Image (tube, rainbow, N blue to C red):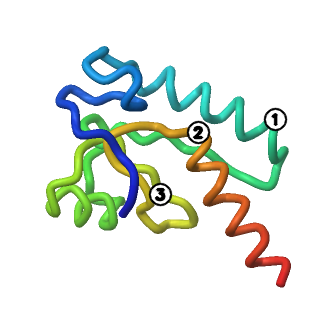
Amino acid sequence: MGGGCSCTGGCPSAATCGTPVDYTEAATKLFDDLKQAYGDKVEVKYVDVDKEGLGDYPVMNQVLQMGYPYPITLVNGAPKFAGGIMVNEIKQIIDEEIKGQAN
């Protein structure tokens, strides 16, 4: 796991630490940014496990049990970030994944 933010209450970056975040809105913005950058090469899915439960998301359950805060960002099913939605860092991971698939 890498990245994240140490503030309480959740924040998308250290720059907005302490500011309440609407993660549904942040995920929508992430979807828009990634769709613009990658087209149909990526899929973004926002899951509110408070509403849906963790039964279908064992990786999320494991990450949360380790003490990492919401939101948890997974790329290709692997946890990468916790505590915020960091668009630039997510793009970097996606670029690395795409480059790795091309080789």
Seen at 69% across and 67% down, the residue is: 96
Q: Is residue 71 left or right of residue 29?
A: left
Badge 2: how crowded within 10 Å, few (<14), some, or many (20+)? Answer: some
Provide the residue designation for mark 1: 36
Badge 3: how crowded within 10 Å, few (<14), some, or many (20+)? Answer: some
Q: Secondary structure at mark 2?
A: helix
Seen at 55% across and 44% down, the residue is: 45
Compare marks 2 and 1 and give the one earlier in the sequence. 1
Residue 35 coordinates in the image, percent (x, y)? 77, 38
In space, the residues marked 2 and 3 are separated at their CA atoms by 13 Å
Give the label on residue 87, or none: 2
Residue at the front extreme, as displayed: 15
Give the label on residue 79, or none: none
Residue at the top extreme, as displayed: 19
Q: Quadrant of the N terminus?
A: bottom left
Q: Quadrant of the C terminus?
A: bottom right
In this rendering, which labeled residue sits more in front, label 2 or label 1?
2
Tell me if residue 20 comes above or below residue 91 in the rendering. above
